Image (cartoon, rainbow, N blue to C red):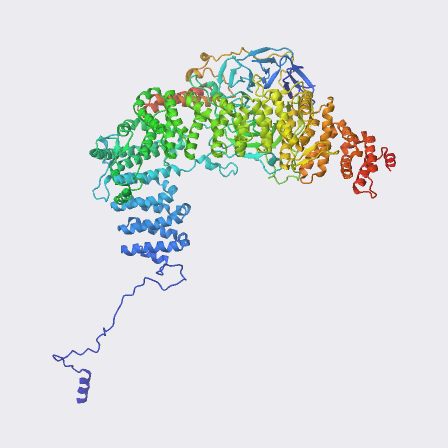
């Protein structure tokens, strides 16, 4: 049997049989399971295709498994508080954890704690990265969702506290789930909230594009990869499908009409806590508090299979199958470092010059040119401010020359 | 020959003229014996054929042609005639707008004053009639003539040009503000002249203009300058207000859905029902693909180039600086002169005459407007810094030295009756409108101007600013806390100053000091609504916007006290002012969401009052506020039993809508640890016991006291108990029933989703047995609720107790007999039937009990048809058929009794129906035998 392309990863809060398990998306048969503890909601994540990280429910540590050694708990990362949500960046370089009101950012290569962002007023309920790891969105029980630029969070000198690039404050009750679409910084973000709405936002400008009002609170939300449909899991167990691309304008539409019930997936009896769509957009995975995980066919809205868990499902996600998962003798390329528990200011860059040194962005995922340019501009403005007394013409010339020199160095660097 | 001679004589007879005689008239003399008169044509004989005319029968062409007449009287007459004609025939204006406007504009520079006055009057009339879009094509001409008049060598024409400007400003501010490049220099030239190149150099920094004084004006130089500054002020106001929207935004229009509005993307709002039924089609266009919005943070370069390109537009800091660089020194000079003139009369510098005060006010207003010319925030900061660097010392020296100012009491000794006369004098003297400025307004404006000069959070400048910020702080504190009532306009300005000072000074002392003063103002009673709203808005914005960035604001005691007072105010306000309540809620909601301790404590303390089912805010306020109040429940730290009792009643009294009540139930459900949503389990907002009793109370809809009271009443709605209806049913109104039905649905759903069903059912069963089973009179909605709830919660392998089942069978039978009497509402019938049906089909024993309790022998004759109808109803239903089959012998027995006791000879319709149903049900299953037995 060839290795599957995608697998289903799910966890429940009871943890009787396993902490989390891997299933076949087609048949629902179990491939692997990882034991030890249980995982809290929205805190199961796969790091770099080599580790599985899951925050222990109600405790202040994160369980780590190497993805091929299913029975052995690799390590426990002890955190300063109870972890409410956890997310690893898609490029595998950073890990974000929501601990009470604060967001902790760790760097995977060294295990350093790079930043503690405390802009939320209440517990953080969900954190998601954009697919290019350049931004992340955090939602909290204080009704706010914040969009952060990762590089601005990482690069800042310690004198300034990092600011989110956008504050989405139009929900009126706690945010329950967030989903980031594709396209990196130009993506659209969907936020679900207890106030019975799902709102779609634009990452780049922070503008709200769409707001859909339901009659029940929405506990989970996801897009399909094309962003044709928005799937919203309600607190009454129904999953609603909102079509974002109206087809009524097309001329050759057949006469079939969207009657009531055609856009609802019915089957769960309790809160739908997690939703995920496969890569090809044909099947939808849902996990619910009624202790089942169901796989649905998006087109016909029928349940394909369902798996019973022993407790409310906390995480269920369809992920591309990691390469190491089914190779028992493989090893992670990078050993997991010790995670530091305290912010170490000496590790942080304290000036613009050494800020470049502590940058560890991977060459292709980020745009070093842009960041260097930004820095050059920043330097320019700094010098403008300092040398205000010097006659304008002179220092302009001087700054320009500095900037050009910097640019040249950037080019060389590349 | 002779004859010839005679003939000649005859031809040329000589007339002898004699002395003393009258000279005979020559034959060829012209008879001048006639009178001549000049022909006046004030009116034309033409009628109707060439359009409307004035009362002098002049049509518009004649009038226009007369405007070129050399005589100024005729010109003036024509202007008056035009006004009369156009006001009589407004349609003509549109037709001849171009001709009329160009001719009238030409007369702005007429050398005769009365003609100019008439022209201005006509212009004002026309301006009232034509909209700005229609004038736009002719506006270059108008403004050219205006410029011409403003720069005219004759001073009288200059003065009248300002009147024209007034008219245009009043009606076409947008069009006029586009001409600012020319007009601004014109303004400068009205009060000053360009220095010679040589003289300009030695007084460096004073700009290239010098004030002019002309002696032959009708007004004094100061009054003239005041008039000009007044116009300049209103012109700048127009420029600021009529600024076109940003380019990026306008380009977005045309995509239809994303039509930019104030620079923000219009979002699509749909509700699920609409979407499902195909009404709300969603089309989310790709928004950030090719063209990022103006708000996108992704720019390759900061677009400083674009700003430089728009240099002509008056919105970059540099252009404003250029203009201000000439204007501000001039204004300072004007002020120095005016103040100097005053000081001759009085030695106390802080008292000003009314005229000087007006002048200063105007200067300050212009300074403010100059700052507002730049829309972007960063540009504004540059401008502020520039002002600070260039003029701070001047301002400090000239303005702040004698701050705060008071009015010099010159005119006060006259009686009030003279007031009108004084004003008339002032008008006559040419002091233009705006002459009377309150000292308070002046001082406040001065504060505003000065405070913008204080820089944001730079420590080293704070010390040097202290000398002039100190008096301002003192003044604000005194004004606000003196207890006097302030108008909303002044208050708004003061609050702006307070805000700026709090944000720039970053000191806790200053913050508390100022906020205390504002709070004193806030605590006054009987404030006007607008003022109250303003203060409320100030505090809430301060909390919401600046809270995070400025720890000194967050720690402010006053703000905390204000937040804590909000719930109390909400309670006190009641239903008196819903708008104000809504505004209070707008602050309470985010503050509660952010977990502000002071607010939550106070909210917790007042929760029972706010959520009181009789007069609490949650029932008296409009729907939007109710919704917010329900949402705020989400953030309440704990729910004591009394509060839950209140909330349960709120759900059932019908003063909140059913959808809101379900929302409330859901909120409580989510807050209880049983729901399994909240992950942090250390705090328990709703205790399990309390939650279950809340559910049960909401389910029944009646408190135990109400049910007790119901047992003894003797109301109309009561149906007496009988054999067919063992319980005496209290019929509730349709509205109440349906409301309760919706709530019950939600409660059932909540109970359904609790973890262990068996335990949950056990609890509910005990509650029913304890509270309801002994009752004689039961409201119909309670019956329906119980019947609906029990089968939903019942687990397959759980045996309900007998007491419960007996009570249920009583309920069921009562409801079935009620069902037959219900005609008024299909919905209620459906609901009742649904409940009965669900109960009977899920609990087979219940059906048996119901059938067993039907003792036909005890029925009177009238009740027989009712019984038969009930039975046929049960028989007709397919899903119940199997259960009925199980009880076939019992059923057969009843039907036998029924036919037996019915003594009537004729077979009634109901009996036929029953027998038919019976036979159909049992067909193929002992049917024939059964039928035979019956007959």
Q: Residue at x 21, y 78 (%)?
A: B27
Seen from the viewer's position, the closer of residues B400 and B689 is B689
Q: In this view, does A171 lie to the left or right of A73?
A: left
Residue B376 spot, x, y in % from top left: 40, 31
The count of marks equals 0
Report if residue A221 is visible in the image.
no
Q: Which residue is drawn at 36% across and 61% down?
A: B57
Give the quadrant of the C terminus of chain B: top right
Q: Is residue B636 left or right of residue B144?
A: right
Image quadrant in which you'd find residue B482? top left
Seen from the viewer's position, the closer of residues B93 and B742 is B742
Give the quadrant of the N terminus of chain B: bottom left
Query: In the orientation shown, which residue stands out farthest toward the left?
Result: B19
Seen from the viewer's position, the closer of residues A4 and B353 is B353
Residue B823 spot, x, y in % from top left: 69, 40
Residue B36 spot, x, y in % from top left: 26, 69
Seen from the viewer's position, the closer of residues A43 and B578 is B578
Report if residue A387 is visible in the image.
yes
Q: Is residue A301 left or right of residue B400?
A: right
Residue B905 spot, x, y in % from top left: 84, 43
């Amino acid at each position: 049997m060839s290795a599957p392309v995608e697998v289903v990863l799910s966890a429940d809060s009871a943890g009787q049989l396993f902490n989390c398990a891997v299933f076949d998306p087609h048949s629902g048969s179990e491939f692997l399971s990882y034991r030890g503890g249980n995982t809290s909601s929205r805190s199961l994540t796969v790091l770099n295709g080599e580790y599985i990280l899951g925050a222990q429910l109600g405790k202040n540590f994160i369980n780590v498994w190497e993805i091929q050694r299913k029975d052995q708990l690799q390590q426990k990362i002890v955190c300063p508080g109870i972890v409410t949500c956890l997310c690893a960046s898609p490029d595998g370089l950073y890990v974000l954890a929501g601990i009470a009101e604060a967001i902790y950012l760790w760097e995977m290569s060294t295990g350093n704690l790079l930043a503690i962002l405390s802009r939320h007023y209440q517990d953080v309920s969900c954190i998601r990265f954009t697919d290019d790891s350049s931004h992340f969105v955090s939602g909290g029980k204080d009704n706010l969702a914040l969009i952060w630029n990762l590089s601005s969070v990482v690069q800042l000198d310690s004198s300034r506290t990092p600011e989110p690039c956008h504050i989405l404050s139009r929900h009126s009750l706690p945010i329950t789930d967030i989903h980031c679409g594709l396209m990196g910084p130009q993506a659209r973000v969907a936020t679900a909230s207890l106030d019975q709405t799902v709102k779609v936002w634009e990452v780049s400008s922070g503008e709200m594009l769409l707001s859909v009002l339901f009659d029940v609170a929405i506990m989970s939300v996801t897009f399909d990869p094309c962003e044709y449909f928005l799937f919203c899991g309600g607190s009454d167990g129904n999953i609603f499908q909102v079509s974002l691309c109206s087809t009524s304008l097309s001329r050759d539409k057949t006469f079939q009409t969207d009657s009531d019930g055609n856009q609802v997936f019915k089957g769960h009896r309790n809160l739908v806590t997690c939703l995920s769509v496969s890569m090809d957009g044909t099947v939808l995975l849902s996990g619910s508090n009624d202790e089942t995980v169901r796989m649905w066919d998006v087109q016909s809205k029928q349940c394909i299979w369902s798996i019973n868990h022993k407790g409310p499902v906390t995480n269920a996600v369809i992920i591309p199958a990691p390469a190491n998962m089914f190779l028992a003798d493989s090893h992670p390329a990078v050993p997991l470092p010790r995670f530091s528990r305290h912010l170490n200011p000496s590790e942080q860059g304290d000036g613009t010059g050494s800020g470049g040194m502590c940058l560890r962005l991977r060459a292709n995922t980020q745009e070093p040119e842009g960041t260097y340019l930004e820095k050059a501009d920043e330097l320019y403005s700094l010098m403008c401010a300092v040398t205000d007394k010097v006659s304008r013409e002179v220092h302009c010339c001087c700054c320009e020359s500095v900037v050009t020199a910097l640019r040249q160095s950037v080019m060389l660097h590349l | 020959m002779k004859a010839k001679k005679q003939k000649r004589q005859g031809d040329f007879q000589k007339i002898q003229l004699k002395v003393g005689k009258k000279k005979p008239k020559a034959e060829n003399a012209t008879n001048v014996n006639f009178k001549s008169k000049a022909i006046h044509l004030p009116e034309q004989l033409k009628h109707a054929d060439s359009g409307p005319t004035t009362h002098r029968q002049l049509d518009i062409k004649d009038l226009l042609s007369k405007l070129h007449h050399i005589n100024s009287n005729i010109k003036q007459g024509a202007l008056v005639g035009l006004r009369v004609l156009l006001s009589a025939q407004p349609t003509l204006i549109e037709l001849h707008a171009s001709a009329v406007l160009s001719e009238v504009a030409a007369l702005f520079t007429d050398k005769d004053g009365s003609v100019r006055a008439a022209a201005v009057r006509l212009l004002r009339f026309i301006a009232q009639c034509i909209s700005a879009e229609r004038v736009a094509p002719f506006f270059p001409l108008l403004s050219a003539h205006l410029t011409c008049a403003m720069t005219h060598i004759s001073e009288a024409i200059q003065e009248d040009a300002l009147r024209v400007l007034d008219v245009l400003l009043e009606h076409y501010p947008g069009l006029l503000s586009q001409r600012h490049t020319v007009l601004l220099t014109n303004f400068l030239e009205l009060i000053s002249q360009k220095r010679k190149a040589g003289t300009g150099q030695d007084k460096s920094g004073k700009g290239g203009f010098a004030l002019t004084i002309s002696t032959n004006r009708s007004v004094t130089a100061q009054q003239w300058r005041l008039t000009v500054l007044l116009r300049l002020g209103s012109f700048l106001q127009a420029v600021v207000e009529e600024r076109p929207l940003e380019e990026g935004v306008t380009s977005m229009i045309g995509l239809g859905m994303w039509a930019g509005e104030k620079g923000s993307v219009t979002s699509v709002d749909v509700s699920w029902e609409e979407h499902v039924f195909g009404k709300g089609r969603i089309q989310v266009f790709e928004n950030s693909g090719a063209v990022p919005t103006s708000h996108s943070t992704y720019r390759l370069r900061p677009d400083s180039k674009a700003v430089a390109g728009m240099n002509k537009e008056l919105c970059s800091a540099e252009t404003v600086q250029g203009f201000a660089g000439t204007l501000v020194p001039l204004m300072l000079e004007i002020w120095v002169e005016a103040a100097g003139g005053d000081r001759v009369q009085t030695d106390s510098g802080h008292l000003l005459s009314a005229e000087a005060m007006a002048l200063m006010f105007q200067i300050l207003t212009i300074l403010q407007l100059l700052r507002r010319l730049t829309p972007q925030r960063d540009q504004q900061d540059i401008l502020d810094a520039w002002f600070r660097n260039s003029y701070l010392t001047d301002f400090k020296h000239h303005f702040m030295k004698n701050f705060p100012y008071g009015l010099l009491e010159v005119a006060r000794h006259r009686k009030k009756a003279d007031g009108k006369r004084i004003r008339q004098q002032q008008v006559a003297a040419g002091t233009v409108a705006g002459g009377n400025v309150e000292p308070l307004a002046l001082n406040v404006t001065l504060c505003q101007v000065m405070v913008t000069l204080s820089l944001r959070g730079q420590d080293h400048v704070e010390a040097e600013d202290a000398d002039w910020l100190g008096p301002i702080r003192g003044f604000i504190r005194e004004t606000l806390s003196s207890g006097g009532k302030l108008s909303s306009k002044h208050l708004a300005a003061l609050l702006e100053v307070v805000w700026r000072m709090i944000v720039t000074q970053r000191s806790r002392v200053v913050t508390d000091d100022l906020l205390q003063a504002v709070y004193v103002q806030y605590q006054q009673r009987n404030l006007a609504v607008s003022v109250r709203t303003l203060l409320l808005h100030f505090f809430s914005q301060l909390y919401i916007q600046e809270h995070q960035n400025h720890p000194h604001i967050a720690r402010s005691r006053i703000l905390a006290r204000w937040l804590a007072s909000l719930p109390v105010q909400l309670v006190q306000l009641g239903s008196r002012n819903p708008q104000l309540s809504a505004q209070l809620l707008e602050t309470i909601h985010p503050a509660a969401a952010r977990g502000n301790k002071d607010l939550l404590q106070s909210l917790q303390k007042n929760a029972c009052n706010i959520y009181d089912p009789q007069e609490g805010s949650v029932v008296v306020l409009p729907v939007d506020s109710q919704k917010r109040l329900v949402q705020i429940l989400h953030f309440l730290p704990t729910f004591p039993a009394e509060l839950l009792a209140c909330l349960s009643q709120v759900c059932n009294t019908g003063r909140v809508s059913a959808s809101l009540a379900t929302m409330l139930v859901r909120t409580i459900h989510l807050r209880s640890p049983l729901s399994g949503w909240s992950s942090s389990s250390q705090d328990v907002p709703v205790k399990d016991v309390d939650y279950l009793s809340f559910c049960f109370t909401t389910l029944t809809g009646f408190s135990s006291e109400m049910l007790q009271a119901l047992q003894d009443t003797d109301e109309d709605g009561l149906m007496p108990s009988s054999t067919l209806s063992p319980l005496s049913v209290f019929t509730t109104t349709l509205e109440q029933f349906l409301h309760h039905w919706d709530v019950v649905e939600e409660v059932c759903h909540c109970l359904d989703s609790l973890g262990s069903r068996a335990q949950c059912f056990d609890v509910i069963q005990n509650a029913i047995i304890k509270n309801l089973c002994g009752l004689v009179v039961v409201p119909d909605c309670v019956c329906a609720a119980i019947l609906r709830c029990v089968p939903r919660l019942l687990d397959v392998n759980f045996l309900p107790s007998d007491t419960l089942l007996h009570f249920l069978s009583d309920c069921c039978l009562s409801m079935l007999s009620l069902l037959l009497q219900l005609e008024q509402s299909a919905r209620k019938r459906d609901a009742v039937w649904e409940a009965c049906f669900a109960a009977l089909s899920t609990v087979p024993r219940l059906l048996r009990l119901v059938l067993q309790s039907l003792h036909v022998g005890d029925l009177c004759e009238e009740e027989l048809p009712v019984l038969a109808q009930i039975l046929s109803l049960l028989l007709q239903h397919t899903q119940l058929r199997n259960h009925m089959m199980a009880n076939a012998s019992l059923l057969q027995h009843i039907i036998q009794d029924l036919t037996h006791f019915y003594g009537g000879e004729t077979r009634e319709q109901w009996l036929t129906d029953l027998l038919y149903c019976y036979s159909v049900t049992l067909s193929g299953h002992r049917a024939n035998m059964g039928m035979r037995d019956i007959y």
